[in-house]
Image (tube, coloured by chain):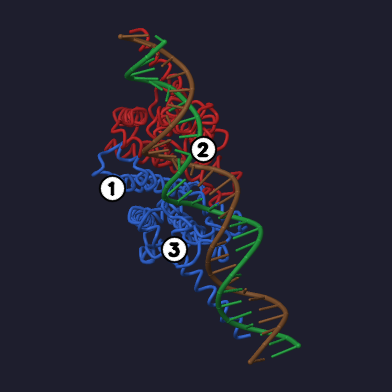
Chain colours: A red, B blue, C green, D brown
Amino acid sequence: MGIVARKEKQKQEVRSLILEESMKLFVEEGFSKVSVRKIAERVQYSPTTLYLYFKDKNEILFYCCESGFKKMLEHNIALGLISDPIERLHQMGVNYLNFGLENPEYYDLMFIQEAPMSALIDMGAGWSSGDQALEALKMIVQDAMDKGVLVPAKVETVAMAVWSMVHGLVSLAIRQRLDKLVPAEDVEKTMHESLDWLLKTMKKA
Amino acid sequence: MGIVARKEKQKQEVRSLILEESMKLFVEEGFSKVSVRKIAERVQYSPTTLYLYFKDKNEILFYCCESGFKKMLEHNIALGLISDPIERLHQMGVNYLNFGLENPEYYDLMFIQEAPMSALIDMGAGWSSGDQALEALKMIVQDAMDKGVLVPAKVETVAMAVWSMVHGLVSLAIRQRLDKLVPAEDVEKTMHESLDWLLKTMKKA
DNA sequence: TTGAAAACTTAACACTGTTAATTATATTTA
DNA sequence: TAAATATAATTAACAGTGTTAAGTTTTCAA
């Protein structure tokens, strides 16, 4: 049965190729410019062939999204070295802002577009990579409370607050809303100040 | 010159009709289902006629957005009655969450989609209704600091933090992300708890 | 070498936003 | 009132979208 294994491997290679080229298209032209036909042209297949490898466009977007999470997790590798929970949470926030601002197209896909979530529902699958990131956040918050540097509260409540805050910053920035509050050239600086402010404020006196 | 005035009035009536029907379409079918042809069918005009009244689809979206802000401001009318700045800020946040959850299609248009902002740039105009809402937020924050119930900080920094937080909550909820953190049936409750937590945390001891 | 299975493509449908050219309808002038 | 002119609205068309069904080519086992 070596032949069926090889075939399977080839199939996976085509799948990977499609996803790779899709993501290049994203980064180069932005979410709204990505179309099935353009992806097909890049991988040198007919547009309809993509439907032999993926259920629909949403499913392609979903898998791109997944690799966005991998990219994001890389940012957080060095995080374990920081022992102070508040400092670790702070650095996690800084990483989040930087990832979003440096990879707006990825961020859009992962947290703003509804297409990947629709695919997820269609597939009946779980949001494994996203869940992983959320678990990490909850654990840090829990740790901070255990060590008494955070006022005790429900973990989910605080985690939701922190996540919403950094997501709000990034998504408003990406969608050109924050420059209505401060001049465009001050947006990034003020975003970091807001994050600093939150961490300072929530730290137990 | 009575005749030219009447003509102008008629033109405005058609414009209003187009916008009204556009918004009905929004609420009924959602942002992604709104098309120039569907709007045209509703107002009983040919699709191309809309281009005699608006530059393009983005401009229609922009004006719909504007009336979304009007709707939002209505929620905040009773706000002036609350004298305690923290309590007022809190109620403003509650109103924001409720508006977003009750009018997801409007919210999408106002704060998530990029189309209205693109129109704004094309038109060279200002974000008057949005600016108004942001000014109100800044004033409350300033007031709270003046009255010593908030730790002094740059007003823009705190305003950005608060806005980002509530926007993060609403936009993550709308885009089905928050139910990855808590069960779907607990989302709304936990959103309010997060807001409560923030206000309690930032209040000067 | 033949026959079946897998991989891929072509043609088509029903949409999308938008422009140019054309027709119909008022309004103004002779 | 009739002809000329502006204004308003439409039809036809372009280039694009996601997706499905039917047909073709290629690959591989008997």
Where residue D22 appears, x then y in whole percent? 39, 36
Q: CA distance from mark 3 to mark 1?
A: 37 Å
Where residue A189 appears, x then y in whole percent? 56, 40
Q: Quadrant of residue B8?
A: bottom right
For discs 3 and 2, the disc positioned in front in the rendered view: 3
Left or right of B15 on screen, residue A8: left
Tell me if residue B28 can be seen.
yes
Q: Quadrant of residue A154?
A: top left
Can you identify the residue that label 2 sits on?
A34
* In this view, B167 is above or below C27: above
Q: Chain of mark 3?
A: B
Left or right of A96 on screen, residue A3: left
Q: Residue at x 52, y 48 (%)?
A: A178
Q: Residue at x 35, y 12 (%)?
A: A4
Can you identify the residue that label 1 sits on?
B188
Q: Which one is nearer the viewer's eye here, A37 or B30?
A: A37
Label 3 crowding class (10 Å Cα cut-off): few <14, some 14-19, many 20+? few
What secondary structure is found at the residue carrying circle 3? helix
Q: Chain of mark 1?
A: B
